[in-house]
Image (tube, grey):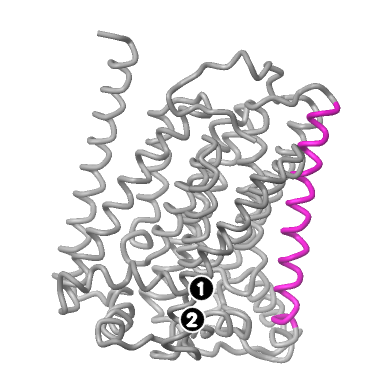
Amino acid sequence: MKIGDIVDGSVRRHQLFLGIIFAVASVVFLVVVYQTGIESETVRYLPYANEILQGRIPAMEYPPFAIVFLTIPRLFSSSEFGYQIAFVAEVFVFFLIGLVMMSKLAKRYRQSQHIAMILYTVLVLLLFEFAVDRFDIFPMILTLLSFYCLVTKRYAWAFLILSVATMTKLYPVFLFPIYLIPFFFNRDWKNMLRGAGIFIAAAAIIFLPFYVFGADAAFNFFGSNVDRALQIESLPASVIYFIHMLGLTDVSISPFQPGVAGSSDNLVGALPDAVAPMMMPLTGVIIAAALAWYAYSLYRMRTDGRDNEDNRLIVLCWAALLTVMAFMLFNKVFSSQYLIWIIPFLTIFLMTSIDFKHKRYVLILSVAAIVLTQLNFAVNIGISGGGTGITDGGMMIILARNIVMLALFILIVWISKDNLKKRYLQERPADNREQTEDQDEVP
């Protein structure tokens, strides 16, 4: 028996073990929901699925392809709890896909597959109810799959799946330029144009039927995001509310309106209303800065002789993490489940950072942000009931979470910059790396 067979068998057993843990947690979750009658977020998705099956295009706050993942559970049950069971089963399948992809990605990064799978599973379990009771795990896994295809030189699949992910939840679109930058640096115009064409064509193919059969509804997801007020969980909303507590401005909370696409608990008043339109341009500037840093990093590695595949892979992941975090943190909306988006990139970042002290600080801040997110959900939704029931104390929990997330973002920026400056990145020739069946040349 070959050593590789033993290792692969060990990985598969580990995947089975972690899959069983997630399955047990899912069953416990469903039993608790059934016994307590806790309102599930998936109940909001059922009407969308019903409309599709009745031949109508629903007006959603989500991009068109999201309806596919919301409709699949409806094919198995029309009752609310039956729909939720099927939805959790769908999430379980995607969790397993992510588990396999995470192990393969770790192998490509020459990191421990076992540690990668444990980190991935622990982070998902820490955000468990958001994973099984929201649909954000679907675009997250699609993005992970796309990223894996990119680093293994399956470029067509990478851009195709990234487009599908974008048409499920908008945030993956900001990874599109990150995918293109290496081709630009290598003057690989063929793959650059081909990838861009596949991305745009796939998005158009997905969007077209929704536009033809429901023109107004097709654009609803875009308008509902552009025109939204400051959601109370966002960084600017929590800061403005603190200013309000000091008596320096006057604001109030506009509660979530059931049945209204894009509705949420929002902060309203002269100051938040003035700040809200500024957040999208500000987010764009910060994301552009992250992209510029990525391009500069590639240039810097070439000029100091560290331009090899290992380093390019590391910087690629760091840039993806910073870009997604920038969109989360500086946008008008920062829902609790958004933390799911960064799990794959955060896992790789933790494993590829060389300084143990850096890893420890990033992990501590990440766990603190998740704990505060759970506390926010328990206090502001579970106890206060959301909306106008949210107290000053509840808003301070949100502010604390956002401060921790901002500190995490700044720390990751500093670590990335420091690693590049101090040459922490390994200076290994590209042709001296270990080959595997999944390791092709990357851009």
Q: Quadrant of the N terminus?
A: top left
Counting from the top left corner in percent of width and height, residue 333 is at: 58, 73
Of 60 and 408, nearer the camera is 60
Mark 2 residue type: Ile
Mark 1 residue type: Gly
> In the rendered view, would you say 214 is above or below 357?
below
Q: Is residue 423 magenta?
A: no
Of 381 and 333, nearer the camera is 333
Determine whether the residue tagged by mark 1 lies in a helix, strand or loop: helix
Q: Main secondary structure of the magenta part?
A: helix
The image's mark for residue 394 is 1
Residue drawn at x 76%, y 23% as measured from the top left: 306
Is 83 left, or right, of 378 in this rendering? Answer: left
Counting from the top left corner in percent of width and height, residue 143 is at: 49, 52
Q: Is residue 294 magenta?
A: yes
Disc 1 and disc 2 in contact, CB within 8 angstroms: yes
Inter-mark Cα distance, 1 to 2: 6 Å
Counting from the top left corner in percent of width and height, residue 35 is at: 14, 70
Numbered range of the magenta stretch: 275-303
Residue drawn at x 60%, y 27% as measured from the top left: 356
- From the image, tell me which residue sits under label 2: 390
